Image: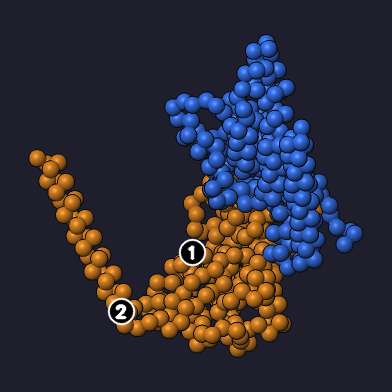
Amino acid sequence: MLDMDYSPLLLSLKVAAISTFFVFVAGVFIAYLLAKRDFFGKSILEALFLLPLVLPPTVVGFGLLILFGKKGWIGSWLLEWFDFQIVFTWIGAVIASIVVSFPLMYQSAAAAFESLDERLSNAARTMGASEWRVFWSVVFPLAWPGLLAGLVLSFARGLGEFGATLMLVGYIPGKTDTIPMAIYFAVESGQMEKATFWVVIIITFGFSLILWVNWWSKRNIRRFTKS
Amino acid sequence: MKRFSFFTLFISLTVLLVGCSDTNETEKSGAVDREKPEAELLISAAASLTDVLEELKGPFEEAHEGITVTYNFGSSGKLATTIENGAPSDVFLSASSKDMNDMEDKELLVKESRKDFTENALVLITHKDSNRTISSFEDIDPAALDHLAVGEPESVPVGRYTKETLESLDLWESLQEKLVLGSDVRQVLTHVEMGNADYGVVYSSDAFITDDVKVLAEANAVWHEPIVYPGAVFAESKHQDAAQQFLDYLTGEEGKETLQKFGFK
């Protein structure tokens, strides 16, 4: 077991971390922009954001191939102008991961912002705080438990992403073999020991993550209610 | 006026057609009601057989009243794993003797039923719009390509044959960085069809069913183990007679013709 190739672990962590970073920034920004605002077509826009959550991975993968394939709409353009290829690279895995985990982040952030007491932000504004300051000193800290939940969910989802990734980036040992990919091919080829190893790793990881978030949010609620 | 009459014609034709198909269906379902299907065969088959078997399904069911056929397609390696782990199945149609031998060693098969029913060849393909012009496997230049799509060699038979071929040409090692491994032969085909991989190695029968790829070369049969397709009935099957009938049909005249029609040998 010790002579195992650990590259899937590192790759999975890298892909999930980078994807979570983009998803977090974009999710928080867009959710804040749309929260407490009502305009024509908002529900359609939100439905569009959440769509990857309900679509089968094969549909997401197909869509990504159409967009980012070498002959795809964006893919052919990237290739021509920047000689840059997304299919069959780990960056493709990041993109697949972003698409499937964005809905989770957006949903959590939107809920967190919606439930904030508008009077607190307004109080800050009456004291002359800029919108930037209001966001960082009032809104963000108050919404943080919700945002953290979204962050962790997105990371876990990114770590587990498989279907769309397999379709977009294929399986290239050492380059695009994330843990779910390694498990799939180990099972297919009957290497049950290898599969079990990665299954145990990913279950342990996911379990500790959820345990930690629950513990953290409980402690936080207690702190808020005490003060 | 002209348009009106055309429209009327269209409508009446549609009504006519719908009417016809309706009566057909009621007749069919009536027949099914009278004679309940005796056997529902579940056939686990190599992904490369997808189109042939779909084509054979209708005629076979028509010729064998009471037997219905359901397919489970996948790489032969994956199918072998799921079956060994207890997934129910009546017939196994594999793209490699190796997976079939494993099954036989574990005594999962009805030994006498095993029969090789067709052969295939390995071809090098590229996208139809590609301007790549090499004409032999020996001409593959690892430095001149970004991605070569092949089957995953441990679980996908076409991948194992490809590995053997490229190893006998001393290319396997130098191509390591460029290989994209597909989970079955059809995924390898898709990688090339969509123009994402420069080359791919699939069975000649797979290249046969699509217009989006062109065949550059066929592998010399001495470079790899013979690509034979063995089929067998499972010892656990509850419908062994029906399963045997399906195998007989596949190895019979009609099966052979259809296989040839789809590029098998």
The reply to whether dot 1 and dot 2 touch (C-beta < 8 Å) is: no
Which one is in front, B230 or A10? A10
Q: Which quadrant holds residue B89?
A: bottom right
Given the current orientation, which residue lies at the most extreme top position?
Answer: A128
Q: Is residue A169 above or below residue B61?
A: above
Q: Which quadrant holds residue A84?
A: top right
For the residues labelled 1 and 2, the Cα–Cα distance comes to 28 Å
Q: Check the rendered structure and report the hue given to chain A.
A: blue
Query: What type is the residue that disc 2 sits on?
Result: Ala
Q: Chain of mark 1?
A: B
Q: Is residue A117 above or below residue B265?
A: above
Residue A191 visible in the picture:
yes
The residue depicted at 85 percent of the width and 57 percent of the height is A4
Q: Position of residue B79 (x, y in %)?
A: 63, 69
Q: Is residue B248 above or below residue A170?
A: below
Q: Tell me if mark 2 has few (under 14), some (14-19) or many (20+) residues whose alpha carbon lies within 10 angstroms of its own.
A: few
Given the current orientation, which residue lies at the most extreme left position?
Answer: B1
Q: Which chain can be seen in orange? A: B
Name the disc covering residue B31, or none.
2
The residue depicted at 76 percent of the width and 53 percent of the height is A207
Q: Earlier in the sequence, mark 1 or mark 2?
A: 2
Given the current orientation, which residue lies at the most extreme front position?
Answer: A226
Q: Position of residue B107 (x, y in %)?
A: 68, 85
Q: Position of residue A12 (x, y in %)?
A: 76, 47
SS at badge 1: helix
Q: Name the residue beneath numbered marker 1.
A: B51
